[in-house]
Image: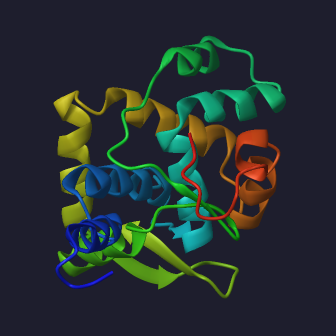
Amino acid sequence: MTPSDPMASTTSWRDTYRYRSSREAESRILLLINGFSTETSGPRSLEGRVKLAKLDFLLRYPKHLATILASRGLRDTARIELERQDSPLESRMVRYRYGPWDPSQFAVLGSLIGRGLVEVVPAVGTNALGYRTTMEGQRLATALEEDGAFDDLVGRIKLLRRHLDLSGEGLKKIIYQLPEVAGAAWNKELV
């Protein structure tokens, strides 16, 4: 391709766009980190980037979350409701070496950390780093929850915390039981 080739600039724009943060992604990740880092008995953190990525996958793909919950014996109305939900995605995750991944996740985390909404802390009992919301991040997450626009998302986060608060490695093993993930080629968008 030559510099004057119109497809060269389009391809470059698409590649660059995949690595950018969006307000929707930032809101989703802020709510997820807040859901896993607030505790009545004191602060805790969401342990590690692998766990964050796997929880984000299940949060964004409610039908896969329903399948996993069913395989773990959950047979209540919350799981049945998940099967009906369709999560409109601003971008799809891709299959990567360690499972589903969103190329924009570094930018999303960087934005949240840079604006003082999320902080990086040592994860308790591991060598990994954890993420937790700051006081300002908690205030914003609470405002987003009260808005009502994120009700389905907040409901899924509560299900994740209640039933799938596992290590990143544990979540990866469960997710790889999904044929849509295990059978996907690397760098292929997941549906």
- What percent of the width, then of the height, locates residue 152? 39, 27
Relative horizontal placement of residue 163, taking residue 143 as reference (left or right): right
Q: Is residue 163 above or below residue 110?
A: above
The C terminus lies in which quarter of the figure? top right
Res. 6 image quadrant? bottom left
The N terminus lies in which quarter of the figure? bottom left
- What percent of the width, then of the height, locates residue 49? 55, 72
Q: How many marks?
A: 0
Res. 163 image quadrant? top right
- What percent of the width, then of the height, locates residue 125? 70, 79
Residue drawn 19% across the image and 64% down it: 136
Relative horizontal placement of residue 96, taking residue 19 as reference (left or right): right
Residue drawn 64% across the image and 34% down it: 64
Q: Nearer the viewer, residue 22 or 157?
A: 22
For residue 118, say whether it is visible: no
Residue drawn 59% across the image and 41% down it: 160
**Tell me, what colour scheme is on the image?**
rainbow
For residue 81, say whether it is visible: yes
- What percent of the width, then of the height, locates residue 110? 30, 78
Residue drawn 82% across the image and 30% down it: 71
Q: Nearer the viewer, residue 12 or 92?
A: 12
Relative horizontal placement of residue 26, taking residue 127 as reference (left or right): left
Q: Nearer the viewer, residue 7 or 12?
A: 7
